[in-house]
Image (cartoon, rainbow, N blue to C red):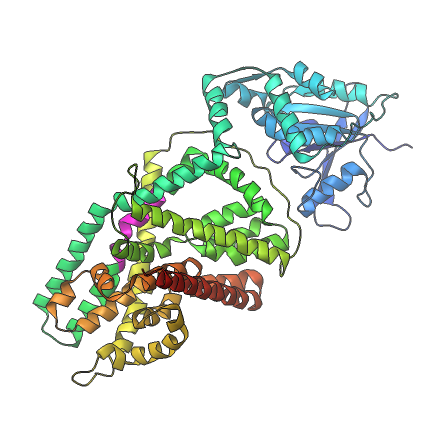
Amino acid sequence: MSALPLVALVGNPNAGKSALFNALTGARQKLGNYPGVTVERKAGRLALSDGRPVELVDLPGTYSLDPTSPDEQVTRDVVMGRQAGERRPDALVVVVDAANLDNHLRFALELVALGLPTIVALNMVDLATRDGLELDAAILSRELGVPVVSTVAVRKRGLDHLRQELEAMLGTDAAARPAPPARDFDTLRREARRIARATIVRETPSRRLTAAVDRVALHPFFGLLLLLGLLFIMFQAVFSWATLPADILESWVTALGQAVTVVLPPGIIHDFLLQGVVGGVGAVIVFLPQILILFFFILMLEATGYMARAAFLMDGLMARVGLSGRAFIPLLSSFACAVPGIMATRTISDPKDRLTTILIAPLMTCSARLPVYGLIIAAFIPARDVGGGVGLQGLVLFLLYVAGIVGAMLAAWALRLTVARGTSGGFLMEMPKYQWPRPQDIVIGLWQRAVIFLKRAGTIILATNVVLWVLASFPQAPEGRSQVDYSIAGRIASGIHLLVAPIGFNRDISLALLPTMAAREVAVSAIATVYAIDAGDDEEAVSQQLGDRLKRQWPLPTALAFLAWFIFAPQCISTIAVTRRETNGWKWPLFMVGYLFLLAYVAAGLTYWTATAAGL
C-alpha cells in the first residue's frame, strides 16, 4: 500500500499556521518528537474534497532556511528531505500573514524557489481588512507563480478552496517545478517588498503615512541620522529639563541637613545622620529628575513603535562586528540595568552570540552611571550653548553614551575574533504600528522607575554609605590630622591610590572606587560623605554644594579621567553575580571584570595624560 501524500504547512511564526492546521485536521491529530531531537512533531489527517486522505504536518515556524535554532533546523531539514526518519513533503502550503505581507513573503519566495508543488495561504485577510488593507490574491499568485488562497483560519474561511487547490496539485500528473536560481537575502527582501506593493489594491491614509515615515525611519543613512537626532535631543533634555526639579530636591536635602543640626546636639549620632545619611544618600537622590527624564524618552520611543525600527537599524551595524541582531533587545535593556539585559540574552540561541552579548552588556551606559555623569558634567562643563540652542552639557552626556556604544561594538568585534570566535546571522522582526502612547502607561512606567531608584537609595546605597561612614570616621584622628586620611577607609584608599595615581585619580576617587562595586551611584554618595567628614564643624564647607567642592579641589584632567573610567568601569556585584549564573561558572565573570578594568584604566589614563599635555 502506497504512503499517503505528505503536505507540510510552513511559514513565519505568528502567521496563523497552527490555527490553519487545527481547522483542516480537526481531532485527527497526533503528537510526537522528530527522531533524534526534542522538537515536537504535529501531524494530522486531511480529507480532500474527493475523499482522498492526505497527511498534513505542521512544521515549526521559522524566518528562513538558514537555521538558528533546533526548531528552525527541523523545518529546513524536512522541506529539503534531510530529516532522519521523515520523508520529503510532496507539496507545501506556505502560510503568510496578509497584514505583514512584505515581511512574510521573503521566506515564501525562498520556499517557492525549492521547486516543490506549493500553495500560498494568504491568512488573516480579515485583520488586514480591519487595518485598512485590501489585497488581490490573483496578482499575488501571478507574481509568485503558484496558487494563492485567501483564508481566515480561525473562522474556517477559505478551507474548501484550499482543499480544491491541494486536490488539483496532488493529482497523478503533479510534479515538482524547476527551481528558480538562488537569490541572496537582500535580493529576496527587495523582491518581497515589490510583490507586496503590487498586491495592494487599496489602503487607508494611515497605512500610507506609516509606509512614508518608515521610508525615512528605516533608511540606512537618514534613519540612522534620525536615531542619533532623537538620542541627542534626549540627552539635551536630561540637563535642560532637570534643572528646576533638581534644584528643588537639593534645597529639600539642605533643609533636612539643617534640621538635623538644629534638633541634635554635636556627637556621633549627629555626624552619622548629617554626613552618612543626609549628605551621602541625599547627594544621589537629587539626580532622580534626570533619570526620570531619560526613562520618559525611552518609554515614549517604545510606546510609539519606534524602538523596533531602531533595532532594525542597529542590526546592520551589529552584524559588522559579529553580533546577531537578536542581541539588540538585551543590549537595549542594559541601558536601564545590565542585570535584566544579561538575563534577556536567553532568547539568543547561538552560544557564542549569547556569550558575546553577556560580556559587552555592562558597556551599555546603565542608569546608575547617570548620577556620576551628571555630577561631574555639572561641576566641570559650563552650562552654555555651543550654537543653535545646543547645550554643551547635554552634548557631553550624549558623547559619553556614544562612547559606551562604540566601546561595546569594538569589544564585540575583538571577542568574536578571539574567545567567542564564530559566525553570526541576522534576524527578522515584524514592525509594530505607530501609535500614540497612552499617558497612563507612561506615568506608570515613570512611577515604577522612581520607586526602584528610591528603594535602591534606601537600601544598597544607604547600607554602603553607612559602612563607608564608619570606616572613614574611626579611629578618631588626633588634633591637626585629616580624619579621612587617618581612618581605616583612608588607609585602604592609600593602597588603592598607589594603583590609580598614574591615571590622575586622587584620594577622593580612590575612596569611592571600592564601594561602587555595590552600586554605581555610590560613587556620588561616597564622595559626598568623605567631604562631609572632612568638613567637620566647618559650616561654610558643609553648606557648600558637592559640585562646587569638586570644581575647587579637582583639576579638570582628573575629572575627565573619572568620566572615562566610568564608561568602561567593571560592573556592580549584582551584574557579576548574574553573569556567573548565566554562564554556569566563574570563568567568564572574572574575564569580564578583568577586561573591563583594563579598558577603564587605559581609557582614564589616556584621557588624563592627553588633557594634561594639552594644558587643561
Residue 21: in sight, yes or no?
A: no
Instruction: Tell me the quarter of the picture where residue 387 sits.
Output: top left
Q: Between 516 and 462, which is closer to the camera in this rendering?
A: 516
**Residue at horizontal 58 percent and vertical 64 percent from the top:** 584
Q: Is residue 496 magenta?
A: no
Image coords of residue 61 (percent x, y): 65, 37
Residue 613: in sight, yes or no?
A: yes
**Residue at horizontal 14 percent and vertical 76 percent from the top:** 267
Q: Is residue 61 above or below residue 502?
A: above
Q: Between 2 and 12, which is closer to the camera in this rendering?
A: 12
Image coords of residue 89 (percent x, y): 80, 33
Image coords of residue 96 (percent x, y): 64, 27
Main SS of the magenta segment? helix
Image coords of residue 35 (percent x, y): 78, 48
Left-right relation of 451 to 503: left
What segment is highlighted magenta in the picture?
284-297
Instruction: Tell me the quarter of the picture where residue 439 sits.
Output: top left
Residue reaching furthest to the bottom = 478
Q: Is residue 294 magenta?
A: yes
